[in-house]
Image (cartoon, rainbow, N blue to C red):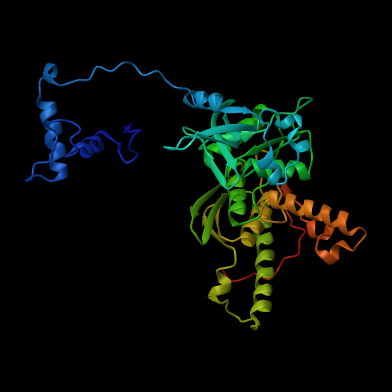
Amino acid sequence: MYFNSQDDRDKGSVIDWMKCRLNSGRISGIAQPPDRTVWQAVNDHFRTYLNLPEAERPRLDLPPIAETAPGEKFHSIYTKNCRPLENTAYLESRGITKSTLARPQFAGRILNQFHTVQRPGLPAKTFVNTAFPAYHEGRVVGLELKGEGFKGQAPESQFSRSLWLSKLPEDGPATHLLVSESALDALSYAQLHPNDKALYASTAGTLTQNKIFELKRLLTEASIPTIRAAFDNDTQGHHFDTRLLAGFAGAENPMKVVREHEQLLTVEVTTSNVASAQALSDKLKIYNAAATVHYYQESGAKEARTISPTLRDELIHSVKSAQNTFQFHVPMNRDALGAFNQAASRCLAFTHKIEIVKSQGKDWNQDVKKDQLQQVMQRELGAVDEHQYGFGQLHWDNPRFEGDGKMPPLRSTEPRNQRLPR
């Protein structure tokens, strides 16, 4: 197999290599005759080469290529353009205080990156960005960049398997690893819920299988018992929760996402433990019953014997696809995904304890700004009824749900709702 670093379309097998060079002019003598198809021409050129005596076959004498460790090529960019964090204007504009940034956990893990632009006829201009180094197995392999009205990444960054990380606590092991979609959200969570014993991580907006492997490696090597998922409180954030649960599912009940459609997510769970499967099914029936009641209340329609197609699309359906294997078809919306994740985290076994926490707004940085606005209102208005302005503590009540990695008892103690048609 090969890959052309100058053209991401030029890649594949040796057959693809020859096909991409027909009529390209890259190699003298390799072309497609007018009376031959592309594939005939490919075969003709290979046949001509293979029919030559061994000594007459043209060869290239190339120097040996030394293996490059992940991040090695990137390291010079990282050291050349980055300095310790001094300019905190961007982070403060997003509500992150200097006291939060001064915590030992974040020392050296947030930097300033200097980017100089030289345009013809104009003086050079240097921009100062906030940079978050991405780590893979202890090496810096990427740089996530943020600035006023700007976000991006440094050239050569490798984000497919790397994470932004805070430092491990200095006085003992971490109690949990908190993972969010961005370093800014991790800082926001740390500001709202200070904890010197936590390790913070960011996936830089995506949660790939490689990043799940890296999270599991960190938990194992640092002997951290708990992972706390703090992804955004939107459909994508709940979708990431499902991926995380699947990645950490225990050997007792393997779990995987088998299909991701714009409107529907299909999750497959294999378990011979009847109690856990029944408990999961019962919790999802409770969600379906509540969703049905809400549908008829909002639509003003009377309940019918048959479920309308609109309502059916909003419910979670399960199918036994094989012996001890169940498929759950979950609508791709925040409520349905959240209900499934909550039920799965409580009913199934996982390799580590999993906690799922959600912000009140779309993300944790939005909550930081609301929290600061609340403080301003209290300072300016004095002793007033907070709930009158929508800033009361009741507004912030969004408890986390978690799974302890243990199977449920044989009998479910929750009331059974009426079985819904599937």
Give the number of callouts.
0
Which residue is drawn at the image coordinates 11% and 36% (left, top)?
A: 44
Whether residue 405 is visible here, answered yes or no, is: no
Which residue is drawn at the image coordinates 55% and 68% (left, top)?
A: 313
User: Residue 319 lies in what quarter of the image?
Assistant: bottom right
Residue 47 pos. (x, y %):
12, 32
Which residue is drawn at the image coordinates 59% and 49% (left, top)?
A: 240
Whether residue 200 is visible here, answered yes or no, is: yes
Which residue is drawn at the image coordinates 73% and 51% (left, top)?
A: 369
Of residues 163 and 87, the one nearer the viewer is: 87
Toward the right, the furthest residue is: 383
Q: Is residue 148 left or right of residue 16?
A: right
User: Residue 251 lies in what quarter of the image?
Assistant: top right
Residue 213 pos. (x, y %):
56, 35
The answer to whether residue 155 is above or below residue 276 is above
Residue 394 pos. (x, y %):
83, 60
Of residues 362 and 258, the one nearer the viewer is: 362
Of residues 309 and 379, the one nearer the viewer is: 379
Toward the left, the furthest residue is: 35
The answer to whether residue 286 is above or below residue 380 is below
Residue 249 pos. (x, y %):
61, 43
